[in-house]
Amino acid sequence: DIQMTQSPSSLSASVGDRVTITCRASQSINSWLAWYQQKPGKAPKLLIYRASSLDSGVPSRFSGRGSGTEFTLTISSLQPDDFATYFCHQYSNYPYTFGQGTKLEIK
Amino acid sequence: QVQLVQSGAEVKKPGASVKVFCMVSGYTFSNYAIHWVRQAPGQRLEWMAWINVGNGNTQVSQKFQGRVTITRDTSATTVYMELSTLRSEDTAVYYCARLQSGDAYDIWGQGTIITISS
């Protein structure tokens, strides 16, 4: 199975900050990587697919980069609604696997 | 609008089975695969299985082989996930999700909480 490792596991930041979350795959997944946002008690919401494509309706302050084994999600200017948990997901090989999540908290 | 609506929370005893449904609306049912993913308390999301809704073919994670069955009812635009021989470690939120044309999960159900307790 492909292991997905996110860093950091948690992050404190302020409104307006720029933050970057990293996801590493244990083997190459090309660009078959997605990023999701999840709030407590809610289903995940797709933000980015194919490593860098913004899903419909997602604000442009979210961006994704990377290919192969290293990927990043950047939020250019944090908004109050962005405080949530973010996780990556590889869909290159079955079984699909997910990162452990990064909890983004208000400083 | 496009929606996946799941069945409600259940409490089951160890050894029992549970069947969760995922009712689809707002798009052509057979055009998209449906996947099942679960999230145990404090754990990362875990992929379980998927079904090609068009032809009914399924693939189940090796971890759940023999315990998970995925079916669909095209007339009801509903996908079912049955998990058998339940144990305490199966306590989790179970999600169905639509695979976006061979890509990521663009639409998710609201989740179904399954609690295993004697």
Image (tube, rainbow, N blue to C red):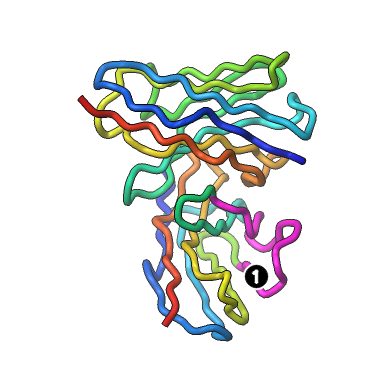
* Mark 1, other Cα within 10 Å: few <14 / some 14–19 / many ≥20: many
- Residue ID for mark 1: A63
The picture places residue A43, in percent across and down from the top left corner, at 53, 48
Q: Which quadrant is home to the N terminus of chain A?
A: top left
- Which is more toward the observer, A62 or A99? A62
The picture places residue B43, in percent across and down from the top left corner, at 34, 49
Image position of A36 (left or right of B62): right
Q: What's drawn in magenta, residue-wise?
A: A44-65
Most distant residue in the left direction: B118
Residue at x 41% of width, y 36% of height: B113
Image position of A103 (left or right of B78): left
* Residue B62, image quadrant: top left
Circle 1 chain: A
Image position of B25 (left or right of B36): right
Q: Amino acid at mark 1?
A: Ser
The picture places residue B22, in percent across and down from the top left corner, at 59, 28
* Residue A58, image quadrant: bottom right
Q: Is residue B51 magenta?
A: no
Q: Is residue A51 magenta?
A: yes
The picture places residue B114, in percent across and down from the top left corner, at 38, 32
- Which is more toward the observer, B76 or A89? B76
Please, is residue A17 above or below residue A49 in the view?
below
Residue at x 65% of width, y 55% of height: A49
SS of the residue under disc 1? strand
Please, is residue B65 above or below residue B104 in the view?
above
Residue at x 75% of width, y 57% of height: A56
